[in-house]
Image (spheres, helix red, strand yellow):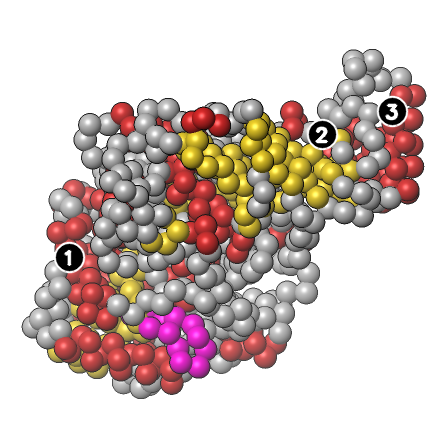
Amino acid sequence: MGSIEPTQSFSIVEATIADLASALASGQTNSVELTAKHLLRIAKYDRRDTLLNAIPIINENAFEAAQASDSRRAASQVPLNPLDGIPCTIKDSYKMQGMTAAAGSPAFKDLVANEDAFTVRKLREAGAVVLGRTNMPPMAAGGMQRGVYGRAESPYNGAFLTAAFASGSSNGSATATASSMGVFGMGEETISSGRSPASNNGLVAYTPSRGVISIRGNWPLFPTCDVVVPHTRTVPDMFALLDVIVAKDENTSCDFWRGQPYVKLPDVETVRPGSYGELADAGALAGKKIGVPKMYIGKQDSDPTARKVYTRQSVIDLWEGARKILEGLGATIEEVDFPLVTKFEKPDPNAPAEKESSAPPHRNEIDMCQLMAYSWDDFLAANGDASVATTLAAVDSSTIFPRPPGALKDRYDDADPLVRHTDVVAHITPDRPATYSIPNLGPALQNLESQRKADYEDWMDALGLDALVWPCNADVGPADADVDEASAVEAWRNGVLYSNGNCAIRQFGIPTVSVPMGVMSDRGMPVNLTFASKAYDDSNLFRYAYAFEKAGSLRQAPPRTPALASDVIESVAGGGKIGSTAPELTVGAEAVGAPGEKKVRLSGSVAADEISGLRVFVDGDELAGVKISKGNWEAETGSLGAWKGRDEERGCPDPDKSMIIVVASGKNGRSTGKMLKVKQYVWDADVSRSIRNINWMIAEHPLYEEIGGLLTAEIRFALAAENCRSLRLDYRDFATERERPPVGLLWTEDDDLYRGG
């Protein structure tokens, strides 16, 4: 989207950071309204209609963060950071103080973060509004395997995966960003978990050189490979984001490459530009010599041992279009071999012949399973949540990577650490050495650096290459690859199971920038073009990527998440500075209607003389007929729709609860937003009898205390559980309840909002 005039209406769908920052600065909208609009898309497309399941954990304090941004804007005499008030998401592996950090694993679903990850802290300091945590497989150890919250689905074509099956763990981040449920997302990568979902969702992705972006506060996987990977819809958006998160972090705790003493890394301030916007050079590709590995465009590498890549014709067609753009910008394209990859993947002559569908090897001089175990142990100790675990030794290994019922066995190489991860806890013994004291660690890290120089950087110099480009992937995997053998064969082929480059790219610390290359004509799925160069040549990659994106503008919005009426930011006459105070608003809810109905009455108070409007939404749909009288308001829903997802995809809040958003818009340009999650049960005679039976048992219990009929947690859990379980009710719904008429029950996140129907 181009530049927006302050008085012109526009949609948040595909809007850029610059568009939204301009609307905020001009008073055309405020952060509370902007946050509400993105939450409504989450309610509609993630939790109800399309069930993308990208953001299973919602930040309960999102409106408070947005309100704080609006207060800063009202009080400020100078322009705020472009990210101030901008809604975003973070992967479930990032720590955010007070939120859980499960990393997609049942073992850690209750682990609470003691602090923000470095990048999360920088985002919050800049004023960004974190809407929630995005989906991922357990511990990022894979791609589209289902974790504690299931997995995300494609907003482009539900028949295909939203990321590579074997390495696409940032699937929720990319799905959310592509669907305009957040303006940008924070992902990660160990093999291709940032690039792959970006490609399948037509996003810009950046995998930095070692140490450029602090990864402190993120769950590790293979620490020698792990990097932060931001997801944006445009290169200029990436520039605005990097201006904030690429910064010096003096603390190197639990950040492997910045903390290790064996390889000296350059200071981040000598690598990054003063502002990333300086890299916006539309003529950057003129006169450049760009190599494209033959193996990724349907041709054969000269090395006879090179693994075959199965490139679909529609991907080759996209490459031919991209090539014309590159050449039109003045670049010379040379088809080349890719010795770094072929040498790294060369079969062991003493090993048994590999099956065609097996994954490329992930070889390393370091025992990656041991290093993974030590780094997790360090992470848990640093986080200090004694209620879950402060050492990996206290964790039941069977709960870390459970295979969902009916799921096929993964097809990783037999020596891959992802195959051996079931033994990870056994590495933590009382006498284990410190992580950086693992035998042979120093020489192994130094060898990685020297091998990159010899097999890649010296090779580029010999050919006179300024950079490499290649299609990010050769095809996309079917959505049922987790349960269907024929689909699994397709999804685990070379060029499909990982992003092209496989394990070598992250193993050797090669920086990349990926940008949209178009949409496959036969699959309806996007594919990216990846730019790669030497270590710490990151800035030139951005120059090339910017020039390509500007010339092509090849990103397409996903068809499964179209614009909603609520997405529009209306035009304003004049705009101006927003007011210093937001309107007061309260919200309550209760179940109403006859037995068999599922309706909710919403009500509360509002300063009617201070507002220009009050809007109420249920699961993304606006309610008509909101009544306001004498400072009070009321609205009633129709029958609430049932959630139809998988049991393991119940996030927080439980999607059985309808998501209520209420926004009061003040006449002074300020707004107040409230978010409520409610669950209604429909009662029949059997349920009523059961409730009376439970109440009788409680009244007879010797621990019962006459404190206004309040039920203690001990009694509630001990006596109500079995009765409720047989009726498919959640016995926690009886917390702090007085005698309830057997008509209806509404549950919200807050005990003080319980009300009988």
Instruction: Name the one closer to the observer, 501 or 38.
Output: 38
Identified at 12% across, 51% down, the residue is 278
Closer to the eye: label 2 or 3: 2
Q: Residue at horizontal 29%, vertical 79%? A: 319
Q: Mark 1 points at which residue?
A: 280
* Position in image of residue 234 (x %, y %): 28, 58
| Highlighted range, magenta | 518-529
Give neighbour class at mark 2: few <14, some 14-19, many 20+ (Cα, 10 Å): some
> On screen, 450 above or below 668?
below
Q: Does label 2 or label 3 sit earlier along the sequence?
A: 3
**Nearest to the observer: residue 189 or residue 231:** 231
Amino acid type shown at disc 2: Arg
x, y percent for residue 90: 42, 46
Q: Can residue 625 be seen in this view?
A: yes
Read off the residue under disc 2.
755
Question: Spatial distance from mark 2 to mark 1, Cα to Cα?
Answer: 56 Å
